[in-house]
Amino acid sequence: MAESLKQAIDDTTLDLGQFLSNFPIPTPAQFAIPPPSEALFPPTPPTSPPNNMSSTWGNIKSEQPSSCTLQGEQASFTELQTPQSNYMSIQNQFNWCNSHPMNWSYTQVRGFLTWAVAEYELPPHEINFEHFRVNGAKLCMMSREEFSLLCPNYGDILYLSIGKVLEEDLPMQDLFPDCGGITADDIDVNDKFDDVNVELGDFPPSPTSTDESYSSMSPGRNSPYYCGSESDYGSGDQTLGNLFMPRYETSDGDSDHDSYGSSPRRSYPDELHMYDSDKEVKPTVDFSVQNAPINMKIKPGGAPERRARGRPRKVRPPTEELLTTGKRGRQHSKGNHLWEFVRDLLKNPSTNPKVIKWEDRRDGIFRFVQSEAVANMWGRKKNNPNMTYEKLSRAMRYYYKRHILERVDGKRLVYRFGAEAKGWRENE
DNA sequence: TGACCGTTTCCTGTTT
DNA sequence: CAAACAGGAAACGGTC
């Protein structure tokens, strides 16, 4: 693993190289030098990644992240030449695997990205770390599309990598520990990408996306990330100018398979092409009859008819995991139910009362303070960038019949736990 | 393999 | 007028 990280560093150019220049690989001799001070560098408990990266996504290597394997070495490799602040920064980069992504600092986000580059053998020059100047909370809020916008060719991989970390079966207190990383102030759907916007300028918009999140990220023509008008799409440029390059095509699903090139590569997180619903970025929409989306009936010679009711059928190309094991990732794992997710947000001081709060603690009445933020977090957990509060609330309403939730009339965004909901009471 | 479950997606209509 | 609510319909993907 250290080898692959070093290889990634050797291969590094431009931004990543600059970043990694602050990231010296220790020599064996340096390993022997003790840390300067216990107070400054308290002994770290044995480090393991927050989860077993292979448990659910069979194709992800089971080794610990590179950064983790170096954890034990870091206490000695920099202090001679490196200022303490730099040292601490480096230590933080290694520490990303010690805490939940929601709690990552910007530095830990970088540490994670460094690991991902090495782990999935991504071409470092195509991943500009400066595009990810966000803390973990913001990173977790970013949709798949945002990842792709920030990193056109490998955003999906990064998105699914972070989703993988989030998806693991951590106990909720580990998922959202109140340990100073994220505060409630960091979670605000209204400024859900503020860090990015402030530091990067506006995102370029999705050319045809109807996703409202894009409208809030409308491009500044003066933004350094404004890459041109629609006529510029698909220039083929692989660098910054291509941030806007559409990667998704029509609903036939697998047209972006080639995006990752044909070179042999370590297995990426699977389900990279899982979602191709009609809300995905679809810069080229062909409404000819044979190419019409499945639910879009075309009148002969006329305009598209109203789409059919119900959930549109998805076209999902088989993943490597599906082909080898016949399985995709688990969906209904323990603790994966929406109401339990909501309950655990209520239990967590990082999210309660900022995004969700009790209206009446004893009666189990609660309110979504930032409904779209909750939806975003739920979507992240389910690896579904298209989740919205509207959809989440539909699922919530199904709980009425099962008495997991009870209706609270007359109040918007307010629900009440029902008789079948367990574990929400203070002394439960 | 198929039934079932817990959503997810989309829709129309209503209420706030 | 927009946002939220309500609930039907159908599809999806995992579990049993």
Image: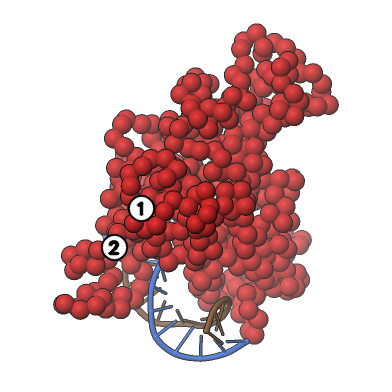
Chain colours: A red, B blue, C brown
In the image shown, does A281 or A61 lie closer to the viewer?
A281
Left or right of residue A300: residue A248: right
Q: Which residue occupies 81% across, 23% down?
A: A38
What residue would you read off at disc 2?
A: A285
Camera-side mark, 1 or 2: 1
Relative to A424, does residue A129 appear above or below in the rendering? Answer: above
Residue type marked 1:
Asp
Q: Quadrant of the C terminus of chain A?
A: bottom right
Quarter of the rendering containing residue A249? bottom left
**Could you say whether the residue bearing mark 1 is in a helix, strand or loop?**
helix
Q: Residues within 10 Å of mark 2 (few under 14, many from 20)?
A: some
Q: Which residue occupies 35% across, 53% down?
A: A233
Residue A2 seen in render: yes
Q: Earlier in the sequence, mark 1 or mark 2?
A: 1
* Residue at the extreme right: A39
Q: Chain of mark 1?
A: A
Left or right of residue B12: residue A142: right
Residue type marked 2:
Val
Q: Are marks 1 and 2 on the same chain?
A: yes
**Could you say whether the residue bearing mark 2 is in a helix, strand or loop?**
loop
Q: Chain of mark 2?
A: A
Q: Which mark is residue A173?
A: none
Residue A387, position as x, y percentages in the image: 49, 62
Left or right of residue A219: residue A340: right
Residue A300, position as x, y percentages in the image: 16, 77
Q: Which residue occupies 43% across, 59% down?
A: A206
Residue A280 seen in render: no
What residue would you read off at disc 1?
A: A232
Residue A87, position as x, y percentages in the image: 71, 26
